[in-house]
Image (spheres, helix red, strand yellow):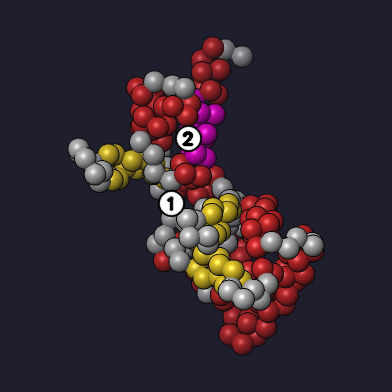
C-alpha cells in the first residue's frame, strides 16, 4: 500500500470517528474535538472543512456567559446515512401500501400486533430486574442494539432520562405517527405501573434527540 493510500485511509477513519462523536455528543468546538483525537486544531479544522465540503457538517454559534459566542460543529441530516436507517425506503413504501390496502384502522391493528411482539421481547430481556434504573438501563441496551444509540442519565431531582440520539425508523415514523405513539406505550408497559414516563424532546419535532423523562411514582 502506498503512503498516499495510507494517509487517505487514516483521514477517512478520522472523519468517520468525528461523525460518530458529533452524533453521540452533539455540537462540539474545535478545541474539544482536538482533545478527543490528540490532533492539532489545524488538523481538526482540515477534517471538518472536508466534511463540510461533502455536506455532512455545518456550524452554529452558541452563546457563552462571557466573551464571544462559540462556533460549534454539528452534523447535517445528510450524515444520517452513516447510521442504521431501518430500511427506510422499504418501510415507508410498505406503510403506504398497508394504508391503501387496509385503511387506517387496519394499519393500527397491525401496529398493535407489532407492539405486542416487541413487548414480549423486551420483557424477556429485562428479566427479573427490579429497580427502575436497572430496568431503564436494560431498555437502553435493547434500543441501542436496535440502532437508537440510547443512554440513561440521572438528574439532580432523582428522575432519569432515556436519551435516544438516533432514530433508525425516522422516515417511517414521519408517515406513521402511530409508531412513536406505540413506542411510548411500550416503554410505559415494560417499565411497570410504578413508573411515570413522558417524552420531552422529539426528533420528529425538530429536536436533536428523543428524550424521555422517567420518574418513580410516589407510594
**Closer-to-camera residue (189/54):** 189
Q: Is residue 127 left or right of residue 181?
A: right
Q: Residue at x 42, y 42 (%)?
A: 56
Q: Distance between the residues labelled 1 and 2?
A: 15 Å
Magenta residue span: 11-21
Residues packed near mark 1 inside 10 Å, few (<14), some (14 to 19) or many (20 plus): few
- Residue 54, label in figure: none
- Most prominent secondary structure in the magenta stretch? helix
Which residue is most to the front? 219
Q: Residue 169: image x %, image y %? A: 57, 61
Tag nearer the camera, 1 or 2: 2
Whether residue 172 can be seen here: no
- Residue at 76% across / 66% down in the picture? 123
The picture places residue 214, in percent across and down from the top left corner, at 55, 65
Does residue 98 belong to the magenta stretch? no
Looking at marks 1 and 2 on the same chain, the residue that comes earlier in the sequence is marked by 2
Residue position marked by numbered label 1 in the rendering: 77
Q: What element carries label 1?
A: helix
Q: Which residue is disc 2 drawn over?
A: 18
188 lies left or right of 64:
right
> Seen in the image, is 93 located left or right of residue 37?
right
Label 2 neighbour load within 10 Å: few <14, some 14-19, many 20+: many
156 sits left or right of 86 in the view:
left
Amino acid at each position: 500500500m502506498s503512503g498516499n493510500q495510507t494517509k487517505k485511509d487514516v483521514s477517512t477513519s478520522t472523519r468517520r470517528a468525528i461523525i460518530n462523536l458529533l452524533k453521540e455528543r452533539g455540537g462540539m468546538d474545535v478545541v474539544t474535538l482536538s482533545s478527543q483525537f490528540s490532533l492539532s486544531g489545524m488538523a481538526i479544522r482540515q477534517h471538518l472543512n472536508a466534511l463540510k465540503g461533502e455536506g455532512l457538517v455545518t456550524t452554529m454559534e452558541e452563546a457563552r456567559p462571557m466573551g464571544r459566542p462559540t462556533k460549534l460543529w454539528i452534523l447535517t441530516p445528510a450524515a444520517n446515512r452513516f447510521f442504521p436507517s431501518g430500511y427506510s425506503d422499504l418501510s415507508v413504501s410498505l406503510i403506504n401500501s398497508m394504508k391503501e390496502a387496509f385503511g387506517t384502522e387496519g394499519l393500527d391493528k397491525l401496529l398493535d400486533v407489532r407492539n405486542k411482539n416487541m413487548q414480549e421481547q423486551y420483557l424477556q430481556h429485562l428479566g427479573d430486574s427490579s429497580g427502575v434504573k436497572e430496568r431503564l438501563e436494560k431498555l437502553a441496551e435493547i434500543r441501542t442494539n436496535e440502532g437508537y444509540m440510547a443512554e440513561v442519565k440521572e438528574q439532580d431531582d432523582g428522575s432519569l432520562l432515556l436519551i435516544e440520539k438516533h432514530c433508525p425508523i425516522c422516515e417511517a415514523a414521519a408517515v406513521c405517527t402511530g409508531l412513536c405513539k406505540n413506542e411510548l406505550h411500550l416503554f410505559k408497559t415494560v417499565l411497570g405501573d410504578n413508573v411515570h414516563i413522558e417524552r420531552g424532546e422529539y426528533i420528529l419535532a425538530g429536536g436533536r434527540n428523543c428524550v424521555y423523562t422517567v420518574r418513580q411514582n410516589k407510594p
